[in-house]
Image: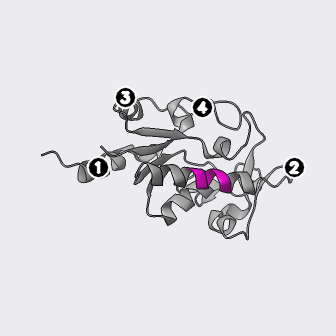
């Protein structure tokens, strides 16, 4: 059975920066009951508390963050890049340990965003881009999907686990 890495907030864990969650009932709960799900909040895994001040990737460039050329910072200018990179590395280690090839991550997050993130201006302006964890996982061949792409995940699972 294929395991799936899932952003903990999507499973109802109160790990978001504001102390909330983004619970997505339905197929994620089914996969959790089947024992497929490995839950993780990369920001918490990287050592950040709950709640915590919001952080954004400068210019939305997670690839630059992973190359050490860009930063993740809070609105007050505090650099939290190391925590984001550490959390991404812990997510990758979990994927390797559990032979995970699929991740379902929270869209828009500076860690988990799959196709869009804030632009770093703290004006809630979204731009095309990926979060730090999503970028690192994708670099290592893990298919990353947002919570809005669960039907695509189901299709991929069907290809990986054909019914005999």
Disc 1 or disc 3, which is closer to the eye? 3
Distance between the alpha carbons at the discs numbered 2 and 1: 43 Å
Query: The residue tagged with tag 2: helix, strand or loop?
Result: loop
Q: Which of the two discs, 3 and 4, labels the residue nearer the N terminus?
A: 4
Determine the secondary structure under disc 1.
Answer: helix
Q: Is residue 13 left or right of residue 69?
A: left
- In the image, taking residue 36 as reference, residue 137 lies left or right, namely right
Expressed as whole percent of the image width and height from the top left, the position of residue 12 reads 54, 29
Query: Alpha carbon of mark 4 to alpha carbon of mark 2: how far?
Result: 24 Å
Q: Which residue is mark 2?
A: 76
Packing grade of label 1 (10 A; few <14, some 14-19, many >=20) is: few
Query: Where residue 139 appears, x then y in whole percent?
Result: 51, 66
Badge 1 is on which residue?
Answer: 155
Q: In terms of image quadrants, where is residue 81?
A: bottom right
Residue stretch rendered in magenta on the structure: 85-90
Q: Could you tell me if residue 8 is visible in this image? A: yes
For the residues bearing labels 4 and 1, Cβ distance under 8 angstroms? no
Which image quarter is the N terminus in?
top left
**12 and 75: which is toward the camera:** 12
Q: Which residue is mark 3?
A: 33
Q: Tell whether position 88 is magenta.
A: yes
Instruction: Tell which of 66 and 62 is nearer to you.
Output: 66
Give the residue number, with chain letter if any, for mark 4: 21
Position above or below: 70 against 88: below
Majority secondary structure in the magenta region: helix
């Amino acid at each position: 059975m294929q395991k799936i890495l899932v952003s903990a907030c999507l499973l109802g864990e109160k790990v978001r920066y504001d102390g909330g969650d983004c619970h997505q009932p339905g197929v994620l709960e089914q996969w959790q009951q089947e024992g497929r799900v490995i839950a993780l909040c990369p920001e918490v895994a990287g050592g950040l508390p709950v709640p915590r001040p919001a952080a954004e990737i400068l210019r939305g460039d997670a690839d630059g963050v992973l190359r050490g050329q860009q930063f993740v910072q809070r609105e007050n200018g505090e650099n939290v890049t190391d925590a984001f990179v550490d959390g991404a590395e812990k997510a990758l280690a979990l994927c390797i340990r559990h032979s995970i090839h699929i991740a379902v991550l929270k869209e828009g997050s500076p860690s988990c965003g799959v196709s869009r993130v804030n632009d770093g201006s703290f004006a809630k302006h979204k731009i095309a881009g990926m979060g730090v964890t999503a970028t690192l996982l994708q670099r290592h061949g893990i298919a990353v999907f947002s919570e809005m792409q669960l039907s695509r995940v189901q299709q991929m699972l069907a290809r990986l686990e054909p019914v005999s």
